[in-house]
Amino acid sequence: MARRVLFWAILVFFISQPVVGQESTEAGLSASEKSAVVEAVCRNLVREYIFPDITERYVKTLTENFETGKYDDIDDPQEFASAITDDLAGVHEDRHLRIRFDPRWISEENNRKELDEAAVDRRAWRDRTRNYGWSKVEILPGNIGYLKLDSFSYEPAAYPIAAGAMSFLANTDALIVDLRSNGGGSPEMVQFLCSYFFDNPRKHLNSFTYRDPGKLTQYWTYTYLPGERLDRVALFVLTSENTFSAAEEFAYNLQSMERAVIVGETTGGGAHDNKFVALNDRFMMSLPFARAVNPVTQDNWEEVGVEPDVEASGDTALETALALAAESLSEQDGPPYAQAYHAWHRDIYENNLHPPTVTEDAMQAYVGTYGPRMITLEGGSLFYQREGRAKMEMIPMGDDLFMFGEIDWFRLRFLREDDSVVAVEGLTPDGRNDMHRRN
């Protein structure tokens, strides 16, 4: 009983005391600074960490570790920050809860608060040179859009880029959003981007609850968006074990509403909203202060991550999604020319995912001249050349059929009589074919 009274007395002390022990940014770590950092960590946890029962265990562990001298022999600031983080994780694993030694960040944050233009400009320049996380937007063969997004930026300048990217992709039939390198960011940007994939009336995407039970933040799709919505596009999201936080929310929102197919690996498992708090002049913490609650599942992805609908390694996730997208499009109702177009590209992506092998002896059977077409075998690969144009390497598709990496609208099929190659036929997705016999 006396020990519990002492514990709560320590909590009251942590809440009431200001941050002390401000040290220089030079190397070294004093006992007073260690004490101040531990006190500041506990104080912030008590004030805002989302689970009071876990907070009590966190504070109890850190105070006991400090009092028993666990940190006494640690002189390196980075090691001290890691030790506290590990001790917290030993109580309860929250991947958003981290202690860091980062004097530069704290200095820049203080300068930002004081409107230091140099610090603000430096951060703005860094974000701009990364294009606010929007690293690649393109349209791949088969009219499949590809968007590689490496962060959900907090910066206002990111929104026109997002709107522009969505406008560029508006005429695609399928879209792949690649979040394999995305570590998270702004829930508001998640809300903005998700909105493009739903029609009106608006949809409830996610909510955040807080330590204060009377506080709640809800995120709904936008009623108005710049440009066209992609609410009918076949949607696929790529994930990896590095996909985290807000990127997980994006995938979880769309998966729970059956709007997208998630392809890849189970994500990192961080469902809490967090903020960065300076503990003194040299140490900071990432403090989880809100918990995600999905309106469909009434749960979130904390600790467990977002499980993919289709498992694929990080190296093969894109090829897998392309094959799935093309197959999905080939099965949709539509005019014959559209179905033939998508079936053509389905075969390309399936072939890329599961390429057949052809022996060099088998390749030798194709070598020869077929009217204006010439087939040669060089360095273990077949090459096609027509009337002095550039050579193109032939990619086997099986059953005497070959495609090309340079062009997606043309293939070659070799024709046989009595098991001997006697002709070659050029194929196109619209059915316009031409044949030449072997000279």
Image: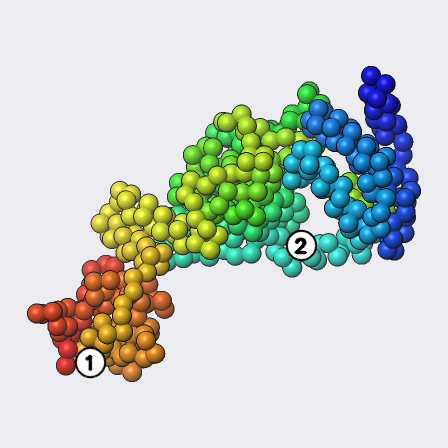
Drawn side of residue 227 relative to residue 350, left or right: right
Name the outermost residue toward the left: 418
Q: Does residue 39 show up? A: no
Pick the residue in front: 72 or 44.
72
Residue under label 2, please give it.
127
Q: Does residue 265 show up? A: yes
Pick the residue in front: 414 or 21.
21
At x 67%, y 39%, the residue is: 96
Of the numbered discs 1 and 2, the one sitting upstream in the chain is: 2
At x 50%, y 30%, the residue is: 203
At x 46%, y 47%, the residue is: 264
- Choose mark 1 or mark 2, whichever is in front: 1
User: Looking at the image, is 431 positioned above or below residue 22?
Assistant: below
- Pinpoint residue 129: horizontal percent, then vertical percent: 65, 59
Q: Quadrant of residue 397?
A: bottom left
Residue under label 1, please give it.
369
- Pinpoint residue 424: horizontal percent, then vertical percent: 18, 71
Q: Are marks 1 and 2 in contact (CB under 8 Å)?
A: no
- Pinpoint residue 36: horizontal percent, then vertical percent: 87, 39
What amino acid type is highlighted by mark number 2? Asp
Q: Specify few, some or many for label 2: CA neighbours under 10 Å numbering under 14, 14-19, or 20 or more.
A: some
